[in-house]
Image (tube, helix red, strand yellow):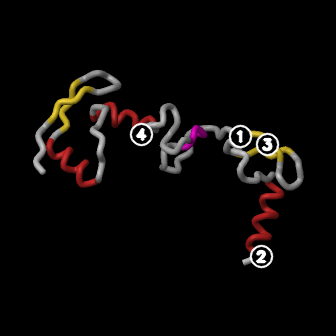
Amino acid sequence: MSFADKTLTCRDCGVDFVFTSGEQEFYAQKGFTNEPTRCPSCRQQRKTLGGGRGYGDRNGYGRNDGYSAGRGVYSGERQMHSTTCASCGREARVPFVPRGDKPVYCSDCFQDQRRSSVRGR
């Protein structure tokens, strides 16, 4: 398959940029089906700011808790959410939004669950 350079318009800054034949070949080898929608500088800026995966203001995995996209680097205070412990009924503070399809435990009950699952192996 032969590729030819294409001129595309950046969806963020509106500047035209070239999607080179080499880049197109790379995209094809990786199985990517969509052309880039941002110029190289806007793509780099999104990566630098932690929005490199395309989820709006959140980072790469739908998280918005101070961690950078997939890098495991903590960059701020973690947001905690209140829920009721599925075991003892006390308030549990957790670093994720409980979905309701799985039990959520307070710290003490979580440790008890962990210990009992290790013993059961």
In the rendered structure, which amino acid carries the disc numbered 1?
A: Met
The earlier-in-sequence mark between 1 and 2 is 1
Q: Position of residue 97 (x, y in %)?
A: 68, 42
Tell me the number on the disc at residue 119: 2
Q: Position of residue 58 (x, y in %)?
A: 52, 36
Q: Which range is magenta?
A: 63-67
In the rendered structure, which amino acid carries the disc numbered 3?
A: Thr
The answer to whether marks 2 and 4 mark residues whose Cβ atoms lie closer than 8 Å is: no
Closer to the camera, 109 or 45?
109
Tell me the number on the disc at residue 52: 4
Q: Would you name the residue on which mark 1 appears?
A: 80
Seen at 18% across and 33% down, the residue is 18
Q: CA distance from mark 2 to mark 4?
A: 41 Å
Vertical relation: 86 (above or below) 75: below
Q: CA distance from mark 4 to mark 1?
A: 24 Å
Seen at 27% across and 32% down, the residue is 39
Q: Tell me the element at label 1.
A: loop
Q: CA distance from mark 1 to mark 2?
A: 30 Å
Q: Position of residue 19 (x, y in %)?
A: 19, 37
Instruction: Between label 1 and label 2, give the one nearer the viewer.
Output: 2
